Amino acid sequence: MPELVFFSGTMDCGKSTLALQIEHNRSARGLQGMIFSRDDRAGHGKLSSRLGLVTDAVEVEDGQDLYAYLVDHLSQGGRADYVIADEAQFLAPEQIDQLARVVDDLGLDVYAFGITTDFRSKLFPGSQRLVELADRVEVLQVEALCWCGARATHNARTIGGVMVVEGAQVVVGDVTRSADEVGYEVLCRRHHRRRMTAATARAAALSPDVLPVTSA
Ligand SMILES: Nc1ncnc2c1ncn2[C@@H]1O[C@H](COP(=O)(O)OP(=O)(O)O)[C@@H](O)[C@H]1O
Ligand SMILES: Cc1cn([C@H]2C[C@H](O)[C@@H](COP(=O)(O)O)O2)c(=O)[nH]c1=O
């Protein structure tokens, strides 16, 4: 039976790498995938992994009907044996419904990859719809770690290493440690709740509890 599978996890846990592996293994056996992506860090029409691999993808646009796109492709003699959708958190709920229809009406497996929650630990609308519709939700095996060593379960947005909780839901970026730009850091829930990033934890550890008293 064809399935809609949602591979979910924090940023930087290997989702795009797995998407590329699935694509590689199937194409090695002569199958042809339809690869969708949206707002990948590597640019328009790309699916990229931090391990350095990248492949071309169809860039999903606002309001695009993914079911109609596939029907068009197939009826023009194109081939698609399965579908991969990376950065699926950025898809609209209707587009997730269209992917479910691809499974049910076209009989294709659809593998969707994305983060579940945003920097405020709120569900992305596309991810919410995936949790509602997917035949299976798979959590990736390679766990990303919080600075404290615990499994990272949440995504923090940072500016200069400091966690922020205001801003647009979508800001494309990476898990950088650079000083002043917007970046992301994966944290365990405890440290996400306390807004404690690696940088702020380090600063807290360095600051003395009691100020030194000078006699002069
Ligand atoms: N230099 C490296 N050596 C080994 N593994 C790495 C290296 N850089 C990144 N990775 C692996 O790649 C993962 C990120 O993969 P990626 O597919 O880009 O993540 P995601 O799509 O979930 O954000 C990291 O969790 C790590 O396991
Ligand atoms: C938490 C969070 C993330 N994003 C963006 C940042 C990245 O461009 C992608 C996630 O990519 P990855 O391959 O899973 O690392 O999502 C965002 O726009 N808003 C957020 O709250």
Image: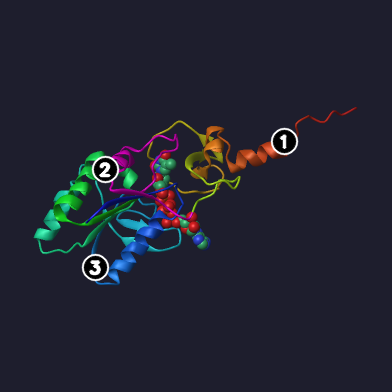
Magenta stretch, residue numbers: 114-142
Marks 3, 1: nearer the viewer: 3
Q: Is residue 36 above or below residue 155?
A: below
Mark 3 — residue? 31
Amino acid found under the numbered disc labelled 1:
Ser
Q: In this rendered view, identify the residue nearer to me: 198 or 152.
A: 152
Badge 2, how many Cα within 10 Å: few under 14, some, many 20+? some
Pinpoint residue 5: horizontal percent, then vertical percent. Answer: 30, 51
Q: In this rendered view, identify the residue nearer to me: 54 or 43.
A: 54
Dot 3 or dot 1: first in sequence order is 3
Q: Is residue 115 magenta?
A: yes
Mark 1 — residue? 207
How far apart marks 2 and 3 lie (CA) works out to 25 Å
Mark 2 — residue? 133
Residue 172 seen: no
Q: In this rendered view, identify the residue nearer to me: 189 or 215.
A: 189
